[in-house]
Amino acid sequence: MATINDNYLKLKAGYLFPEIARRVNAFAEANSDAKIIKLGIGDVTEPLPEACRTAMIKAVEDMGDRSSFKGYGPEQGYGWLRETIAAHDFQARGCDIDASEIFISDGSKCDTGNILDIFGKNNKIAVTDPVYPVYVDTNVMAGNTGNINEKGEYDGLVYLPITTENKFIAEIPTQKVDLIYLCFPNNPTGATATKEYLKAWVDYALGHGSIILFDAAYEAFITDPSLPHSIYEIEGARDCAIEFRSFSKNAGFTGTRCALTVVPKTLKAKALDASEVELWKLWNRRQSTKFNGVSYIVQRGAEAVYSEAGKAQVNALVSFYLENAKIICEQLTGAGFEVYGGVNAPYIWLKTPNNLSSWDFFDKLLQTVHVVGTPGSGFGAAGEGYFRISAFNSRENVQEAMKRITAK
Ligand code: PLP
């Protein structure tokens, strides 16, 4: 009989969101009249910007004409999209990033998981706790961890707790780690990073030969002009960081699928023979072998995000969700909840009242006011006693959910 990748057996039984779905479905079946409002999973609700739709319709027409038809595109993405991204997202902010260092993909979820393909097996890996679960689970699948302990932590990973005590900003470790996942604005806490804080990480990484895996999926939600949008705004980051970005949350591409990963050509890591190898070459090889590019139609849609009309429409979308976040923060604070995040970020992180466990609070909200959020413990052991509320929903649903919660 064939054998399996036994690492999969180490994974915690239920991934967070299927468990939420199971409880919500069971409740809905038993309470068919209840109008459930879901502020749990971070999926967008508002339609795609018109500029993106128009560009995609035009791209469909291109595909219907022999002279403009496209077959396989470059595995790394079309040059016109990579050039546009390099100019708008990086060079306009003073970041020294070239189009050739940008790889277009069908999602940051895949990229943050797939990136492990190009790293060795003996790296010490640090994650914050709580954290976007994909970073942890993909390391488990890749065999980079031991088993899970009773606290819910995997042996072999270095957990950096983020709690009220450190204002949800992880302390820079005293020990040496090789790979560090950072996510700002943060999922799930909504915390943001200053330039000084990122500089401390870049200095740490340069000093220890570490690589920062910087997830900027929510950078569009930054409105404070003092906050960095990219790790490459920090001097030296070209030599120690990979950045992940996505069109999912700014332009509503969660169902359309388009993202990008930046691997600077100056970034190096060690081979077994101690020689230093450019990570760009490995990622390029990995993508060329295992990936066949994002559809031409979708890439044209992503390009339109940077047109004048696209920029205005994306800004309007982001502002809409940020206004939702503001309403949630104000209403919950007014009702006496201890609330964090929700500014420069679409997630609100609240302390559960009366020291309820995260899942008890989840069940209580579901059963009493029919509102779904995400238990903080699902993002890691240090998330116990916290709860995430997402601002991705219609205004009507957000207002109704807040009315129900604050009336209790
Ligand atoms: N990174 C973080 C921190 C996220 O929260 C998410 C989605 O919720 C993603 C990446 C996934 O993005 P994508 O839709 O591009 O796969």
Image: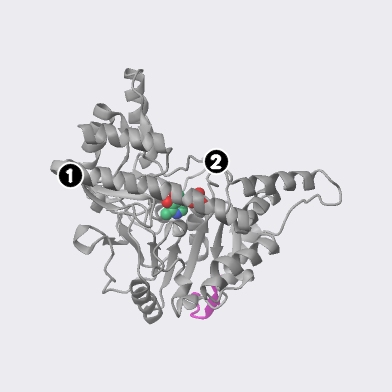
Q: Secondary structure at mark 1?
A: loop
**Residue at the spot x=36%, y=57% of the render?**
145
Between residues 362 and 75, which one lies in front from this camera angle? 362
Q: Which residue is mark 2?
A: 47
Between residues 124 and 126, which one lies in front from this camera angle? 126
**Residue at the spot x=78%, y=44% of the render?**
61
Judge left or right: residue 373 versus residue 248: left
Q: Residues within 10 Å of mark 2 (few under 14, many from 20)?
A: few
Where does the magenta region start and end? Answer: 271-279
Which of the 4 quarters of the picture holds residue 240? bottom left
Which label sits on residue 336? 1
Under mark 2, the amino acid is Pro
Seen as rendered, the residue at the extreme right is 67
Judge left or right: residue 210 versus residue 312: left
Q: Secondary structure at mark 2?
A: loop
Is 296 colored magenta in this rendering?
no
> Which quadrant is the C terminus positioned in?
top left
Seen as rendered, the residue at the extreme left is 354
Under mark 1, the amino acid is Gly
Vertical order, 191 against 354 (above or below): below
Q: Position of residue 232 (x, y in %)?
A: 48, 73
Q: Residues within 10 Å of mark 1 (few under 14, many from 20)?
A: few
Q: Position of residue 330 (x, y in %)?
A: 27, 47
Looking at mark 1, is its residue's CB closer than 8 Å to ligand 1? no
Number of numbered labels in the structure image: 2
Is 275 colored magenta in this rendering?
yes
Q: Is residue 376 visible?
A: no
**Residue at the spot x=74%, y=53% of the render?**
72
Between residues 129 and 290, which one lies in front from this camera angle? 129
- Say whether disc 2 or disc 1 marks the residue closer to the N-terminus: 2
Q: Position of residue 309 (x, y in %)?
A: 61, 54
